[in-house]
Image (cartoon, rainbow, N blue to C red):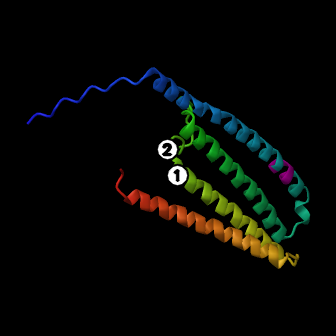
Amino acid sequence: MTQPAPRPSKPKPAAERFLELWLFRSRWLMAPFYVGLVLALAALVIVFANEAIHEFSGIFGKSPEQAILMVLSLIDLSLAGNLLLIVIFSGYENFVSKIDTGDDEDRPGWMGTVDFSGLKMKLIASIVAISAIALLRAFMQLSEGEQIADRTLAWLVGIHLSFVVSGVMLAVMDWLSSKTDKH
């Protein structure tokens, strides 16, 4: 039994083609956002350097707990930088254009493979880690005898738990959507 020949598609009207072309090109309006995020990353490097200089200048007078708090602060800034880099690379490649790095062996393996769902999961994981570090820093300060208001501590715990629950819910939604038939 032979299949009927497909009907030739009717050419789109010029106005529709023009509109679709400009809608597609409008993705470049996102590029300034990513340039702005690169500038934010540069600002974060300056803050990191300032924090490192400040913290390392008094390293010999620090207690072990203070040294741990210093490390947590630097890790916190590093995670924020990683978060920015993930958003810059993945967002640009997903929504604007592929980044052509040629045959550069330093290209991160995940570039070009992180879709919007993966980007969401990386973002929430980074946010949870940053929130956990802030909470750990507060607990360490308490253990050193510093006063932290109960209300402040409750907010830190509540915010952290809301990020954790949000992350779990996003993971469950992604898992459920991967199990459903594609329409």
Residue drawn at the location 88% of the way across and 66% of the way down: 62
Q: Position of residue 149 (x, y in %)?
A: 85, 76
Residue contact between numbered discs 2 and 1, judged by CB atoms under 8 Å = yes
Q: Is mark 2 on a helix, strand or loop?
A: loop
In the rendered image, which residue does mark 1 sit on?
118
Q: Is mark 1 on a helix, strand or loop?
A: helix
The answer to which of marks 2 and 1 sits earlier in the sequence is 2
Say which quarter of the image contains residue 90. top right
Left-right relation of 78 to 105: right
User: Vertically, is 10 above or below 31?
Assistant: above
| Residue type at the position of mark 2 | Thr
From the image, give the main secondary structure of the stretch colored magenta. Answer: helix
Mark toward the viewer: 2 or 1: 1
User: Vertically, is 66 above or below 104?
Assistant: below
Q: Which segment is the magenta one? A: 48-52
In the rendered image, which residue does mark 2 sit on?
113
Q: Say the numbered circle drawn on residue 15.
A: none
Q: Is residue 150 magenta?
A: no
Left-right relation of 41 to 29: right
| Residue type at the position of mark 1 | Gly
Quarter of the image with the N terminus in it: top left
Residue drawn at the location 80% of the way across and 50% of the way down: 48
Q: How many labels does the image show?
A: 2
Q: Please say whether residue 103 is visible from this viewpoint.
A: no
- Label 2 crowding class (10 Å Cα cut-off): few <14, some 14-19, many 20+? few
Name, please, the residue furthest toward the left: 1
Q: Where is residue 101 in the image (x, y as percent from the top left)?
A: 57, 31
Q: Position of residue 168 (x, y in %)?
A: 55, 66
